[in-house]
Image (cartoon, rainbow, N blue to C red):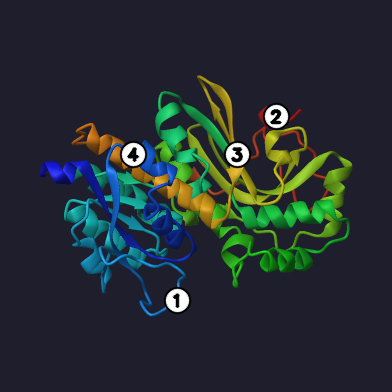
Amino acid sequence: MSGAARRTLRIALAGLGCVGGKVAEWLLDPSHPVHAVSPLRLELAAVCVRDPGKARGLALPDSVRMAGTLEELAAADADVVVELIGGVDRAGALVAAAIGVGRDVVTANKALLAHRGPELAARAEAAGRLLFFETAVGAGTPVIDVIEDSLGVCRVRSVHGVVNGTTNFILSSMAERAGMTFGEALAEASALGYAEADPSLDVDGHDAAQKLCVLAQLCFGQEVRPEDVATTGIRHVTPSEILDGLEHRLALRLLASAELRDGRLRLAVRPAYIPRTHPLGQLNGVRNGLWIDTAEAGGIFLSGPGAGAESSATGVLSDLARVARLRAGGATAWPLRMARAKGRRGLLGAAAESALGNAPAPSPRLRGRIETALAD
């Protein structure tokens, strides 16, 4: 690699939607803080979009190449490919191709990582490439960075999280306004831009299950897939169930749980009552949070916005700055924790309801429980 190339990190970007457009805007803005913290000059070199004629409110300079296909983008003169198109098949082909021709990769794609994360991480590690994905779980909240680096020396015993902004907005809105139904709260979330036109991925728990897979792969070193997660959404939550919890000082939230117990990893996404005194029980609106229990450091709580283009774009830029720091420092290899995820033995698609779980569940139908570590 030439000296000029070492001074510049050339970026190829797939997708100019809400998040991709914001990433491109900030990369093109020399006053954005990312340019001050990156040891390499960050340069947007190429982009690829599904519909090149669509108005996006973003003027790309002539120096930015418009690639006609994802294959062209992977082969573009760039150092790192940013994948923001979503899905599994096309995105997976792009990431694999980029790694294959010597590119580092940044992705926000939780579905891709849930289905193919360990495989792609192993490919990247074998090729001496970087694969970063901060935005895939916590948007701009540095969840992945903390797990990979700060908690890398710890043994994780359990992970509990409120990891979907749409469902958290719906459930906290139902709690704040007595009698509000699920349908009414969903309509408000849609009007405010917090819910997709088809909200099924969120409200049926699949988005949270995909994120839980990424977390479990990192924390427990097992190859976990969405079908391993016992998943229940929030469509059938009623106002009375919300009020039942409030009477007992409990918040009803969509809880994603992974717990290692008796050598088995228990995985679940389901509505659960959480004590209002616990940090997870205090999350309202689109705010998300993660409670990680470790053998060495005890309980760690991370929280931040779980939705929004700016928050997600912040996570992407933090990954790009990390790539720049490693490459500027001469890194030729980087151990990728997800590449260590092997096997699927001992997985139990069942709620992490340990014998220690004593939080009351007033509703006979929603038996959500949580460890006493999260109780008063």
The amino acid pointed to by label 2 is Thr
Q: Which mark is residue 303?
A: 3
Between marks 1 and 3 in the image, the one whose residue lies nearer the viewer = 1
Q: Nearer the viewer, mark 1 or mark 2?
A: 1
Q: Which mark sits nearer the N-terminus, 3 or 4?
A: 4
Q: Quadrant of residue 74?
A: bottom left
- For label 3, the crowd category at 10 Å Cα-Cα, with few meaning under 14, some 14 to 19 and many 20 or more, is many
Q: Could you classify mark 2 by the number of other residues whose Cα lies within 10 Å: few (under 14), some (14-19), or many (20 or more)?
A: some
| Mark 4 or mark 2: whose residue is earlier in sequence | 4
Packing grade of label 4 (10 A; few <14, some 14-19, many >=20) is some
Mark 2, residue position: 372
| Cα–Cα span, label 4 and label 2 | 43 Å
Residue type marked 1 = Ala
Q: Specify whether residue 210 is in view.
A: yes
For mark 1, what is the residue? 55
**Could you tell whether 41 is left or right of 350 in the image?**
left
Numbered disc 3: secondary structure: strand
* Residues at circles 2 and 3 in contact by the CB criterion of under 8 Å: no
In this rendering, the answer to whether 317 lies above or below 182 is above
Residue drawn at x 52%, y 53% as measured from the top left:
310
**Which amino acid does the dot numbered 3 rest on?**
Ser
| Mark toward the start of the polypeptide (1 vs 4) | 4
Residue 345 shows up from this direction: no
Earlier sequence position, callout 1 versus callout 3: 1
Query: Which residue is depicted at the point 18% across and 62% down?
Result: 75
> Is residue 230 rendered to the left or right of residue 32?
right
Image spot of residue 20 (x, y percent) = 42, 60
As helix, strand or loop, the secondary structure at mark 1 comes to loop
Give the residue type at disc 4: Ser
Residue 303 in the image: x percent, y percent?
60, 39
Say if mark 1 contacts mark 4, CB within 8 Å: no
